[in-house]
Amino acid sequence: MDDAAADPAAGLEALGLPPERAAELSSILRGLVTDLALRDLPRLELGGAHRWLRATGTVIGSAAPGLVRDMVPGLDDRQVAEAAFHPNLLPPVAFELRRRRALLRRAKDPGALSRTGPGALKLSAALMTSRFLVHDHLAARIGVEATNRLGASHAETIRSIALGAATGRAARTEPAWGAWGLLAVLQALLRHRELLQAPATSVPAPPTQAAAATSTVGDLGLFLCCSAANALIAALPTTD
């Protein structure tokens, strides 16, 4: 999962994208999307956030198609596979974060994450947006309690994979960078949706929501990632 030598476009080809499109998409993710996440959360590249992105891509990427099939009956195999699109965009960003850290002359410790810094307001707004999206598109389909349990379960698995055998200072400081870093990257994906050209199989709005809550299969995969990020943040100590 931490293979820095892997071609980040290769995983995108596994989504069925032609090599040229996979390379173009990888360039957007490693450029515009990564740059935006770093503007919202400076120093993100200095720590282990790349592990949390990869873990989320693995966990949600494998679970999303089956979950979306249950949420929206009647979709065929090709359509439910679209739910894995956004989770599979996270590894190229992880690759780029690790690459940028490697370019630094001296390795730096990002230290503890302070949410009173320059990115605090943006992160607070991003968390509010993420919560609204999860409520309107997931909880409206399967209920608030089921959505919370699902997010917490995914978060626990992601945390276990990302932290591995980390101890000491890394075990204390990395979860905050991982959780908020994941949220920053997901918000960057949301803000570049037109460029990313996600699959566009639409799904009807949940019965309890207005027509404005319509979304695509790909969106539901993205909102499942948001649900996990929300749960990871909720589990952080209040001092993070």
Image: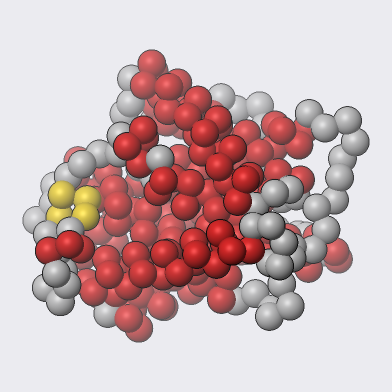
Which colour assignment does the render follow? secondary structure
- Left or right relative to 92: residue 97: right
Looking at the image, the residue that sits furthest to the bottom is 145
The quadrant of the picture occupied by the C terminus is bottom right
Residue at the top extreme, as displayed: 20
Residue 234, image x and y in percent?
56, 76
User: Quick check: can you spot residue 141?
Assistant: yes
Number of on-image labels: 0
8 vs 153: above or below: above
Residue 227 falls in image quadrant = bottom left
Q: Is residue 3 above or below residue 127?
A: above
Q: Which residue sits furthest left? A: 74
* Image quarter hosting the N terminus: top right
Tell me which residue sits at (20%, 63%) in the image. 213
Q: Nearer the viewer, residue 102 or 13?
A: 102
Q: Position of residue 84 (x, y in %)?
A: 35, 46
Query: Where does the image place residue 228, in percent across and percent down from the top left?
Result: 47, 65
Residue 17: percent from left, percent from top: 33, 26
Q: Is residue 164 left or right of residue 70?
A: right
Q: Which residue lies at the image location 32% right of the left edge and 37% below the top edge?
A: 194
Can you tell which quarter of the image residue 146 is in?
bottom left
170 to the left or right of 70:
right
Tell me, yes or no, if residue 163 can be seen here.
Answer: no
Residue shown at the point (65%, 74%) measured from the top left: 236
